Image (cartoon, grey):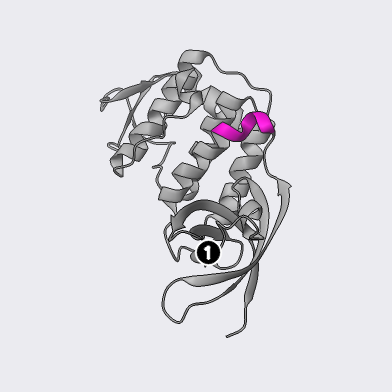
Amino acid sequence: MADITDAALLLRRIPYSETSLICHILTASHGRITLMARGARRPKSIFRATLAPLFHLKLSWRPGRQGMGTLTDAQRGEQLVSDDKMLPALEVIAVTDKLFQEGDPHGYDELLEAFMLLNARQADEGQCAALWLMLERAGWLGDLSHCWHCGEDVQQSAPMYWQAAHLLCRCCGKGLEVSPGLRKGMAGVIRQANIYMPQHDRQRWRMMIALVLREHGIKLPDGSQNQQ
């Protein structure tokens, strides 16, 4: 069977035996796949330094007859985020790993877009915006223009409440309060760079993200940005 070549992003690599790695990959044209990188842990392996997250990758692999394929070639391109954004970017990757499963055709373009958001903004705001984008693209966020319970339009000057990845109006209110200022700040950060949010709004936004993940049984990783 002929090898397949595609642009790729590394999500996760797991040691296998004494010399190899199992790699979870998002590809541009083939969705999420899992590849065996044989001998990748050996000191002289061409894969050892190439297979790294947060870099553009070009991979070639031989599909397996059933299940996992075998990596045959790997080339590493440019770094995707600046050095000061690498820790928050790794957290975005950890969440992305949970959002898109084996065989899912999506994820590659979405993760690249999230990295662009993160790279162009302050680390804290950018990380929240990137995580929010990934949740939205994965279909894990509800309608943010109406109360999901009664259908009333979101009132720009009124507080709303966050529950089960949806907004609730004051009458149906129950859950985490989401102020008009927070909603405006979230939209501003997503739209453009150089928007700064108060610390309590950033923390509240992160809590909203954590609650969405919790609905799906996922805990938000304890990254350094979590401590702000």
Looking at the image, residue 70 sits to the left or right of residue 165; the answer is right
Q: Tell me where residue 2 appears, x and y as whole percent.
A: 62, 83
Considering only vertical position in the picture, is 109 above or below 122?
Answer: below
Considering only vertical position in the picture, is 95 above or below 60?
Answer: above
In the rendered image, which quarter is residue 88 located in? top right
Q: Tell me where residue 185 appears, x and y as whole percent.
A: 55, 23
| Residue placed most toward the observer, 188 or 42 | 42
Q: Residue at x 25, y 28 (%)?
A: 172
Q: Looking at the picture, which amino acid does disc 1 mark?
A: Gly
- Furthest-bottom residue in view? 1
- CA neighbours of label 1 inside 10 A, class few (<14), some (14 to 19), many (20+): some
Q: Residue at x 29, y 43 (%)?
A: 217
| Residue placed most toward the observer, 126 or 7 | 7
| Residue placed most toward the observer, 102 or 178 | 102
Looking at the image, residue 173 sits to the left or right of residue 116; the answer is left
Q: Tell me where residue 186 appears, x and y as whole percent.
A: 53, 27
Q: Tell me where residue 77 appears, x and y as whole percent.
A: 73, 53
Label 1 sits on a secondary structure element that is strand
Looking at the image, residue 42 sits to the left or right of residue 209; the answer is right
Q: Quadrant of the N terminus?
A: bottom right
- Furthest-right residue in view? 78
Considering only vertical position in the picture, is 65 above or below 148?
Answer: below
Q: Residue at x 51, y 31 (%)?
A: 128
Q: Main secondary structure of the magenta part?
A: helix
Which residue is labeled 1 in the image?
31
**Magenta-colored stretch includes residue 56:** no
Can the viewer see residue 22? yes
Q: Which residues are magenta?
A: 83-87
